[in-house]
Image (cartoon, rainbow, N blue to C red):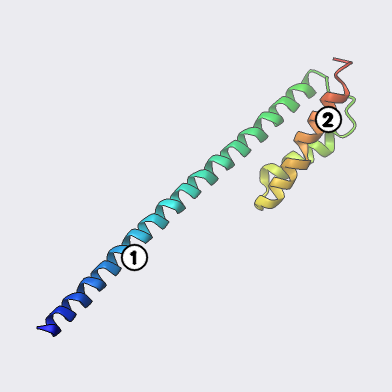
Amino acid sequence: MISVIILAFIVSTIFIIFIIKKKYYEYIKKEEEKERISDLEYKFQFYSDNIFYMTVIKILIKIGFLKNFVNIDKMMEDAFELYYAEDSVFRDECYKNGIRRRFIDYMEENKKKI
């Protein structure tokens, strides 16, 4: 009788462990999926910001607004590297310190001329 109770306890414990393990893996999968979606949203935002600034710069060059801008070549190089970069750390650094910052600085410096 006691051996049946012990056997039932062991079987139920193993069953409970498998259920908990399954729920844990489901939870981990959901979290990984949330993180993957978050990364995709960030990359899309990053990509669309880059395209926006590149488009603005190209338009300003076409209308002649940036013809006297000294660092336009460097800005375009940064944008090119940013667009084709594989390394996300490099893209982040380029994005933080590169074309966006220079473009904003240029616009602030030349507010009076506009």
Question: Regarding mark 2 in the picture, which secondary structure is present there?
Answer: helix
In the rendered image, residue 52, in percent from the top left (x then y), is placed at: 66, 29
* Residue 105, label in figure: 2
Question: Regarding mark 1 in the picture, which secondary structure is present there?
Answer: helix
Q: Determine the residue positioned at 81% across, 34% down.
A: 102
In the rendered image, residue 73, in percent from the top left (x then y), is placed at: 84, 36
Judge the density around disc 1: few (<14), some (14-19), many (≥20) Cα neighbours within 10 Å: few
**48 with respect to 8 (left or right):** right
Say if 20 sits above or below 29 in the image.
below
Q: Determine the residue positioned at 79% across, 29% down.
A: 104
**10 with respect to 80 (left or right):** left
Say if 114 sits above or below 99 in the image.
above
Going from the N terminus, do you reach mark 2 or mark 1 first?
1
Q: Which residue is mark 1?
A: 21
Q: Foreground residue, 33 or 53?
A: 33
User: Mark 1 belongs to which amino acid?
Assistant: Lys
Judge the density around disc 2: few (<14), some (14-19), many (≥20) Cα neighbours within 10 Å: few
